[in-house]
Image (cartoon, grey):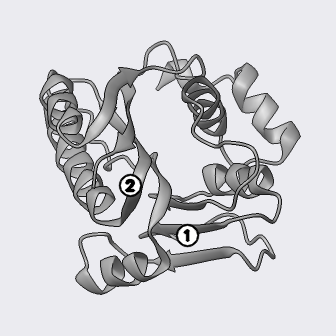
Amino acid sequence: MAGYEKPDFWTLKAKKEGYPARSVYKLEEIVAKFGLMKAGGSPAILDIGAAPGSWSLWILRKLAGAGKLAAVDIQDLGIAPPDANFTFIKGSILDEAIRARLRELGPYSLVVSDAAPSTTGNRLVDQSRSEELVESVMGLGLEVLAPGGSLVMKIFQGGEEKRLITALKGRFAQARAFKPEACRAISFETYLVATGFKR
């Protein structure tokens, strides 16, 4: 992990702006590029794999009291925003009781996931675990999204992106892979972005 030792521009920026992790700028770029959070309105948003909480915190700041956010993770969040429109659920999205609770809080106009599996250092194993996780997130997204909604999911690149994008195109108006500027140069992660959900 030698390449991660020195804090880069994004890490320092996150610290300065009060975010637990630099990943927040990936979400910011994706939302801006694809127009995922329109001004006005009262959207419902779901953040899957939310810990340590940077994406949730950014979304809450963006919502500014309008709309609501639900977040889920198997770990505790590193944030505790005093926001009446924020619900955090600790648990796995593979647990039916957790999924039922998330369905109750929906439907959502936007589902985002920066979730990643615990890495082993074996790229093939890590890619395989990432694909499984993305398929679980996608399955839940299709259950809880409102018509016209959008889905954003992180995946480790390994050749399965095309298959997943094809599957997404069957349920969304548009789907593509996108790698934000804030991704580390040595990282093999990218994001699948699907818009215009067809219920």
Q: Going 22% across and 33% down the picture, which residue do you hit?
A: 169
Mark 1 / mark 2, whichever is N-terminal: 1
Side of 11 where 118 appears, left or right: left
Residue at the image position 45 percent from the left and 20 percent from the top: 179
* Quadrant in the rendering for residue 34: top right
Compared to residue 4, the image places residue 18 above or below, namely below
In x, y percent, where is residue 1?
A: 46, 26
Residue beneath disc 1: 70
Q: Is 132 above or below relative to 34?
A: below
Q: Residue at x 70, y 56 (%)?
A: 41
Q: Is residue 195 above or below residue 53?
A: above
Q: Is residue 16 left or right of residue 75?
A: right
Q: Residue at x 18, y 34 (%)?
A: 164
Cα separation between marks 1 and 2: 18 Å
Q: SS class of the residue under badge 1?
A: strand
User: Along the line of sight, which residue is nearer the eye, 165 or 190?
Assistant: 165
Residue type at mark 1: give it. Answer: Ala
Residue, disc 2: 147
Q: Nearer the viewer, residue 144 or 14?
A: 144
In the image shown, does 107 or 90 lie closer to the viewer? Answer: 107
Quadrant of the drawing holding the C terminus: bottom left
Please indicate, yes or no, whether residue 7 appears anywhere in the rendered image: no
Pinpoint residue 170: horizontal percent, then vertical percent.
Answer: 17, 38
The x and y percentages for residue 105 are 49, 78
- Say the numbered circle drawn on residue 33: none
The x, y position of residue 185, in whole percent, is 49, 12
Tell me which amino acid carries mark 2. Pro
Along the horizontal axis of the image, is 102 left or right of 168? right
Task: Single out the residue that lies furthest toward the right.
Answer: 16
**Mark 2, secondary structure of its residue:** strand
Closer to the camera: disc 1 or disc 2?
2
